[in-house]
Amino acid sequence: MRGNAPQYRLETPRTLADALAKLRAEPGRWRAFAGGTDLMVLLEAGQLKHADYLSLHRIDELKGLVREPSGAWVLGALTTYAEVLEHPELARTFPNLAAAARETGAWAIQNRGTLGGNLANASPAADSVPALLAYDAELELRSASGARWVPHAQFHTGYKTTVLKPDELIARIRLPAAGGNRFHFFRKVGTRRFQSISKVCLAARADLRGGRVIDARLAWGAVGPVTLRSAHLERSLAGLSAADLGDAKRRSALLSALAAEITPQSDVRSTRAYRLKVSENLLGEFLDGLVAFAAGKGGA
Amino acid sequence: MSGAFPVKCTVKCTVNGAAQELQGHPMERLLDSLRDTGLTGTKEGCGEGECGACTILMDGEPVNSCLVPLAQAEGAELCTVEGLPARAGRKVSEDRAALHPVQACFVSEGGAQCGICTPGMLVAATALLERNAEPTDAEVREALAGNLCRCTGYMKIVNSVMAAAREMRAGGNRAAPPEAGR
């Protein structure tokens, strides 16, 4: 079968200014086309509703990875999963992002799929998105009239919706450096390790100082209409030591608090009950890892 | 739908070492553009980037050609399964012996069954061995994780890649045409 290519327009602006001018001149007409790993699937399935696209692949301003003196990393929106994996220092600093990149699709998808595309596509089952969310990513949105930085936590507004205006593109993603000894946890659960879409995904991190959690993030995929953080649980973790975390009562309270923070649904990939149970298991795994980390290196 | 249907475009690229102009709609799948030139070695399996049968090399990197729109191939260096022998320095000919070592080992180790997944497997395996001359079993399996075979298990496929790796490391030339009279 073939998608009906003649029904669609795909233009290739050579510069960011050209792309932004086009978006500004005809608001809503053009949409961004990055790696195409989702849009081409919809095209082939006859489900690609929007007609006119700007292919961003020639725009150098949207490429490249830079480490700032502060230790923060700034990634062009067109950074592919493969490029994430090609930067050992980035992968060491943000291992959840590397883990997500490695388990998104497989090699051929990782060569095409982009972080900006994963964000803009706004699927709740995206894998790089929880990883970015847990690292407090900030997104630079560019339009013909300038740039604004938006916290990732405010970017997704609902199922497949974002704050991106019709004349804006995601240009860059900024990942701030860690604020303490950082424990990282990433686990994607799907039908198989590679080439499957998540049933549940947890990207989490906890920063420790003096043996106590000073700041934690738990970002979930595929358990709600958007990739989401469990903010109440994050706050509950703050101030806890390895001993606190190891306390059985405290642990079971944390686990039972999870159900109020996620809203998994039954769909083609899994059921609500399975997702809830697996989410609880992933939280348990995260807590086990955190206790071990806090008792060891993080306790220093 | 806004305006008239977009006209076809001409995309200049390199296909299996030769400069080529591919004609088609910008959103057309590279898979279709390539097959339309007669390079039907690249197969369509699922058409949604899951099975890897349409894997080709784009600037040396494996990609699913069903997910790449023609417009994005502008200026790219493409290699399909038909280009593998030349990639290994083999003379492209009708001679079955003129194969890339990966192809030769799929033959000798029984790595192909129905053959639909085979071109994608060969291309992805070649890309792996160009980067990693001595892969572990796990590395081969991860590199081929996006290539699905529905005939059989993956044992013979993995064995074929491992055999090719050994042969390429040894500089062995079993795949080359045998000399006359031997």
Image: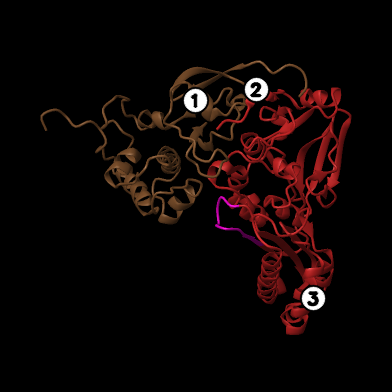
Chain colours: A red, B brown
Instruction: Name the residue rendered at 61%, 49% in the picture.
Output: A104
| Residue B104 within the segment the image draws in magenta | no
1 vs 3, front mark? 1
The spot of residue A181 in percent (x, y) is 72, 65
Residue B94 in which image quadrant: top left
Q: Amino acid at mark 2?
A: Pro
Q: Are marks 3 and 2 in contact (CB under 8 Å)?
A: no
Q: Which residue is mark 1?
A: B34
Please, which chain is the residue tagged with disc 2 on? A
What separation in Å lies between label 3 and label 2 (alpha carbons)? Answer: 59 Å
What separation in Å lies between label 1 and label 3 (alpha carbons)? Answer: 59 Å
| Quadrant containing the N terminus of chain A in the rendered view | top right
The residue tagged with tag 1: helix, strand or loop?
A: helix
Q: Please tell me how crowded label 2 is: few (under 14), some (14-19), or many (20+) other residues with Cα within 10 Å.
A: some
Please, which chain is the residue tagged with disc 3 on? A
Q: Are marks 1 and 3 in contact (CB under 8 Å)?
A: no
Q: Amino acid at mark 3?
A: Leu
Q: Nearer the viewer, residue B30 or A250?
A: B30
Q: Is residue A12 above or below residue A1?
A: above
Q: Nearer the viewer, residue A283 or B46?
A: B46
Q: Please tell me how crowded label 3 is: few (under 14), some (14-19), or many (20+) other residues with Cα within 10 Å.
A: some
**Residue A240, numbered label:** 3
